[in-house]
Image (cartoon, helix red, strand yellow):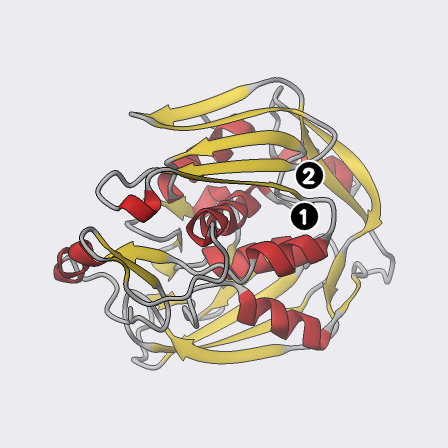
Amino acid sequence: MTLRGAAMEAFKSSLISWRSTGKQQQTLGGCIEKTGRALHSGNLSTVRIWPELAGKGRHFDFCSLLIPASIDFAEESRLCTTLRKDGHTVRTVEHLLSALEGTGVDNCRIEIVNSDEDDTSVEVPIFDGSAREWVEAIDQVGLTVAMDCNGRPCDRVAPYLTEPVHVSKGDSVIAAFPSNETNISYGINFSQVTDLSPQWFSSSFCTGSFYSKQIAPSRTFCVYEEVEKMRSAGLIKGGTAENAVVFSTSKGLLNPPLRSPEEPCRHKILDFIGDVSLFARNGSQGLPFANIIAYKGGHALHAEFVRKLSGIL
């Protein structure tokens, strides 16, 4: 079976048509190594990202256990996307996966080591709360055509939506419609924060440079009055004003300036791309060709959207 056939076989869904992009699968031109503090555990983590063969896709190598960056291994977790396999978890993968998908790294192996020597759970560093440092590291080593085990390049395929689809929970919704381009419009509405009520940003992904310049620098954000509640729940132990944009219900933006007027919405698109990259298989593209509209979404709804596309729901 060809890699294109394998990708199509992986997700049999009437909603998706897998088509060639006219390009070859890519991997990194060298190894990336970065160390930083994790958002939720607060631990230091070292990440090494290695080039990989065509057709292998993106996967995490944790204690000699390979965990594919696939929706098959995504589990429900608060404020981040987590992958779990055989009792081992990799947390907060969305920014790294977003950078890999957004820059076209189709195949790579990702090793993560925590400073606390936990042998069951690791977490990707948060850095400044965006995907910018990952994109810069990818730019430094560059991309190269990935070869399979026989030394041959492989066709890069992508999912095209064939009919309208939507998922929702309460007043949160993601709707997508067939298109020959990938367009994403994302809206947020935090009624208790004037600066975040409501806000929209729309984007068209025609080039990788658009992602690197317009999406990757956008930082995660939070509401100051909810911070203690999150910390009491064992979350954001590594969160600071240096790795998040902080808004207050009474005082507005507490750590200006924003990198763009719609930075929170752009970050939602960043998260969405990382989560939807879990649709990728065998070195294919994960982000579908579609007109996508999302409103008040989050990691759980993003995952439900991917499961809908894959025919799991």
Looking at the picture, which amino acid does disc 2 mark? Ala
Say which residue appears at 74% left-offset and 71% top-offset: 142
Quadrant of the rendering where the N terminus is positioned: top right
Q: Which sits in the foreground, 48 or 120?
A: 48
Q: Secondary structure at mark 1?
A: loop
Q: Can you say whether 305 is above or below 53 in the image?
A: above
Nearer-N-terminus badge (1/2): 2
Lateral position of residue 129 relative to residue 78, left or right: right
Image position, residue 252 (x, y; %): 27, 55
Looking at the picture, which amino acid does disc 1 mark? Asn
Image position, residue 59 (x, y; %): 56, 59
The crowd level at tag 1 (other Cα within 10 Å; few <14, some 14-19, many 20+) is many
Say which residue appears at 36% left-offset and 73% top-offset: 242
Say which residue appears at 29% left-offset and 80% top-offset: 116
Q: Are marks 1 and 2 in contact (CB under 8 Å)?
A: yes
* Residue 104 visible in the displayed image: no
Q: Secondary structure at mark 2?
A: helix
* Residue 160 visible in the displayed image: yes
Task: Give the labeled residue for mark 1.
Answer: 282
Say which residue appears at 15% left-offset and 57% top-offset: 233
Determine which of the numbered discs, if any, sits on residue 101 in the image: none
Task: Give the labeled residue for mark 2.
Answer: 7
Lateral position of residue 16 relative to residue 120, left or right: right
Image position, residue 7 (x, y; %): 68, 39
Q: Can you say whether 237 is above or below 46 in the image?
A: above
Location of residue 232 by image quarter: bottom left
Lateral position of residue 234 relative to residue 34, left or right: left
Q: Can you say whether 45 is above or below 306 in the image?
A: below
The crowd level at tag 2 (other Cα within 10 Å; few <14, some 14-19, many 20+) is many
Lateral position of residue 70 relative to residue 198, left or right: right
Q: Which sits in the foreground, 111 or 289?
A: 289
